[in-house]
């Protein structure tokens, strides 16, 4: 069963790690330590960051991003909203910079570095704690502020690729409406390994029947459903259990299915707790049986952008999407430098942008740091290769 804080939950839950760091996170100075902090308090949508000009008085990450040049004060929401850079800079100066004896730019940079570190720490802890090496992963960045910062904390984690999907601002909503319908049933039935096939099939039968009935009541035909069986297992005399699934397939489990299950438990245990931690000699136990019934729904049709590609001329540096330059702050360059700005809507498949650069869309802003390279793929996703720019080794 999953653990929340120090409490064990007896029903299955979706595992989510969240952090109070985002565009609206407020920067503040701890009165006790005199240290700069970011979040978890946020300005929300109303009044929002100071630069929104809606009554906000506390400097936020968005205000810092604007001061550093990452955001375009005249192109926020595709130009529908004007941001007040002077107000953002004054709020950072008043609340952060002057009390700490630094410039507004230094304070904004510190705010950005702190929020990046907080996000990289969260991902590092979440992945390593579950036996996953983040250096083997690809980071998806979405939302309004995520693509501004993602490449920074990806580099801190050793991640070599960041993907900004075409659906960035509504990516969570798209995932929700495209998700299948799921019903799940479970029952406690303790069995010592090895288990007789008849016993485990008999134990699964009522759970399968119940899930099928629920899917049928929801309007799903049997051919549009998928049944996934799993068991919660542990070594004998242990308390904590691990869930191990059976591959979807035959109606009845065989002796070979069970033997494969026992081995997968050992493998999963070592992935979670370290190589050599599995101890089959202690004996294995099955504690809980679960059936997950999936009602398969039609998925969104994703088309390539070949028609868009024909409408413009792609180039190795995406010249057709170039909008101009503005001064943007980068730590590597120790200050503001003239930086190329690109219009996402004019990029074509294969168009390549070398960092430092900023790619603007009506829904988000993508910062390509020095030494990184961004390429638009055939489905309009931006793929950022970390450390693959000029003079760097490609991943």
Image: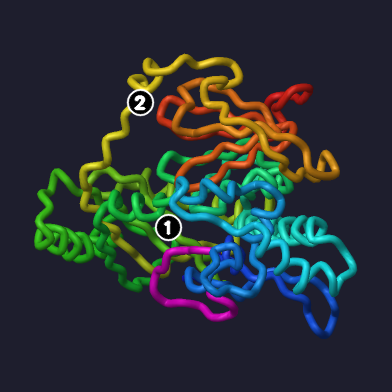
Q: Residue furthest right?
A: 101
Dot 1, crowdedness within 10 Å: few (<14), some or many (≥20)?
some
Viewer-proximal residue among 215 and 281:
215
Viewer-proximal residue among 144 and 216:
144
Mark pair 2, 1: CA separation = 50 Å
Name the residue tied to disc 1.
Answer: 194
In this rendering, the answer to whether 126 lies above or below 150 is below
Q: Residue at x 51, y 70 (%)?
A: 54
Q: Are discs 2 and 1 less than 8 Å apart at CB?
A: no
Residue 106 drawn at (x, y percent): 82, 57
Q: Provide the residue span drawn in magenta.
A: 3-17
Q: Is residue 175 left or right of residue 391?
A: left
From the image, state whether disc 2 or disc 1 is nearer to you. Answer: 2
Q: Secondary structure at mark 2?
A: loop
Upstream in sequence: badge 2 or badge 1: 1
In this rendering, the answer to whether 219 lies above or below 159 is below
Q: Residue at x 22, y 47 (%)?
A: 296
Residue 230 drawn at (x, y percent): 37, 57
Dot 2, crowdedness within 10 Å: few (<14), some or many (≥20)?
few
Q: Residue furthest bottom?
A: 32
Name the residue tied to disc 2.
Answer: 304
In this rendering, the answer to whether 107 lies above or below 364 is below
Residue 138 drawn at (x, y percent): 57, 41
């Amino acid at each position: 069963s999953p653990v929340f804080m120090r409490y064990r939950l007896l029903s299955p839950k979706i595992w989510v790690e969240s952090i109070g760091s985002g565009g609206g996170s407020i920067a503040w100075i701890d009165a006790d330590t005199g240290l700069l902090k970011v979040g978890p308090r946020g300005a929300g949508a109303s009044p929002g960051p100071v630069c929104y000009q809606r009554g906000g008085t506390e400097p936020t990450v968005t205000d810092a991003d604007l001061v550093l040049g990452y955001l375009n004060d005249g192109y926020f929401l595709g130009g529908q909203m004007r941001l007040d850079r002077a107000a953002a800079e004054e709020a950072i100066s008043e609340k952060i910079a002057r009390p700490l004896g630094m410039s507004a730019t230094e304070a904004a940079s510190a705010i950005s570095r702190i929020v990046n570190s907080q996000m990289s720490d969260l991902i590092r802890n979440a992945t390593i704690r579950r036996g996953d090496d983040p250096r083997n992963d690809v980071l998806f960045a979405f939302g309004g502020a995520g693509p501004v910062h993602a490449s920074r904390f990806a580099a801190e984690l050793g991640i070599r690729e960041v993907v900004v999907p075409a659906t960035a601002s509504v990516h969570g909503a798209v995932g929700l409406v495209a998700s299948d319908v799921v019903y799940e049933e479970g029952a406690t039935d303790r069995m010592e390994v090895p288990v007789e096939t008849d016993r485990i099939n008999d134990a699964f039968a009522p759970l399968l029947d119940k899930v099928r009935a629920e899917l049928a009541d929801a309007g799903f035909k049997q051919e549009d459903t998928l049944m996934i069986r799993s068991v919660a297992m542990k070594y004998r005399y242990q308390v904590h259990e691990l869930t191990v699934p059976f591959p979807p397939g035959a109606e009845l489990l065989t002796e070979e299915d069970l033997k494969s299950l026992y081995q997968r438990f050992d493998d999963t245990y070592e992935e979670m707790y370290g190589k050599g931690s599995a101890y089959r000699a202690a004996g294995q136990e099955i504690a809980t049986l679960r059936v997950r019934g999936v009602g398969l729904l039609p998925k969104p049709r994703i088309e390539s952008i070949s028609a868009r590609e024909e409408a413009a001329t792609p180039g190795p540096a995406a010249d057709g999407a170039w909008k101009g330059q503005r001064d943007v702050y980068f730590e590597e360059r120790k200050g503001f430098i003239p930086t190329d700005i690109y219009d996402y809507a004019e990029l074509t498949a294969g168009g390549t942008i070398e960092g430092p650069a900023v790619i603007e869309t009506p829904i988000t802003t993508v910062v390509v740091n020095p030494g990184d390279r961004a390429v638009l793929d055939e489905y309009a996703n931006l793929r950022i290769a970390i450390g693959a720019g000029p003079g760097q080794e490609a991943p």
